[in-house]
């Protein structure tokens, strides 16, 4: 007898577990990700944080994680991920844009940004920036109606 075919594919119930991020100084990166994005080390996986292993960080109790590896940053490697994307509520998105993260963020050229400019993707809003090691980050919300109603129309650009 054949196994039942899942209607939406093998990964229909899957979630993102983690994204690997390569940085030259894991302690400094952990402090930046904690300060700017509110990520904390996941104690259940603390034993993995060896010289070659990852420091697992999360703001979702470990449901989705960033794995910090101490290696060459992505600007010095050939194969790299495109960016990290974090989903937040509409009110949290507006707060993040208005008040900014609690630490410096950068553009792709490594210049410190004075502010974040939301992009209207039609159904979602996002802001983009880089960490100090060139890893690109996105904070996004699918609560577009809330942002459109409560956000500042002067800081929104269409993508």
Image (cartoon, rainbow, N blue to C red):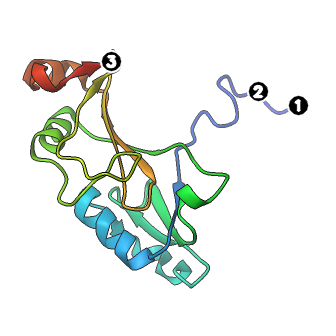
Q: Which residue is mark 3?
A: 123
Horizontal relation, residue 10 to residue 30: left or right? right
Between marks 1 and 3, how big is the CA–CA gap?
40 Å
- The residue that disc 1 covers is 2
Mark 1 and mark 2 residues within 8 Å of each other at the beta carbon: yes
Q: Is residue 82 left or right of residue 58?
A: right
Q: Secondary structure at mark 3?
A: loop
The secondary element bearing badge 1 is classed as loop
Q: Counting other residues with Cα less than 10 Å from the Cα at mark 3, is it few (<14), some (14-19), or many (20 or more)? A: few
Who comes first in sequence, dot 1 or dot 3?
1
* Residue 58, x across and y down, in percent: 38, 61
Occupied quadrant, residue 98: top left
Q: Quadrant of residue 61?
A: bottom left
Q: Residue 42's x, y, as percent?
A: 40, 71
Q: Identify the residue under disc 2.
A: 5
Q: Residues within 10 Å of mark 2 (few under 14, many from 20)?
A: few
Query: Is 16 placed left or right of 124 in the picture?
Result: right
């Amino acid at each position: 007898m054949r196994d039942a075919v899942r209607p939406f594919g093998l990964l229909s119930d899957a979630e993102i577990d983690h994204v690997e991020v390569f940085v030259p100084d894991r302690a400094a990166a952990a402090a930046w990700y904690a300060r700017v994005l509110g990520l904390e080390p996941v104690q259940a996986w603390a034993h993995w944080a060896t010289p070659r292993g990852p420091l697992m960080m999360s703001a979702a109790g470990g449901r989705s994680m960033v794995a910090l590896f101490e290696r060459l940053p992505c600007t010095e490697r050939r194969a790299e991920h495109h960016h990290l994307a974090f989903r937040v509520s509409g009110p949290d998105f507006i707060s993040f844009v208005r008040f900014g993260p609690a630490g410096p963020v950068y553009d792709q050229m490594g210049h410190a940004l004075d502010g974040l400019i939301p992009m209207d993707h039609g159904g979602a809003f996002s802001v983009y920036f880089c960490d100090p090691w060139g890893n690109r980050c996105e904070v996004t919300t699918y609560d577009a109606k809330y942002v459109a109603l409560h956000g500042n129309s002067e800081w929104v650009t269409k993508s």
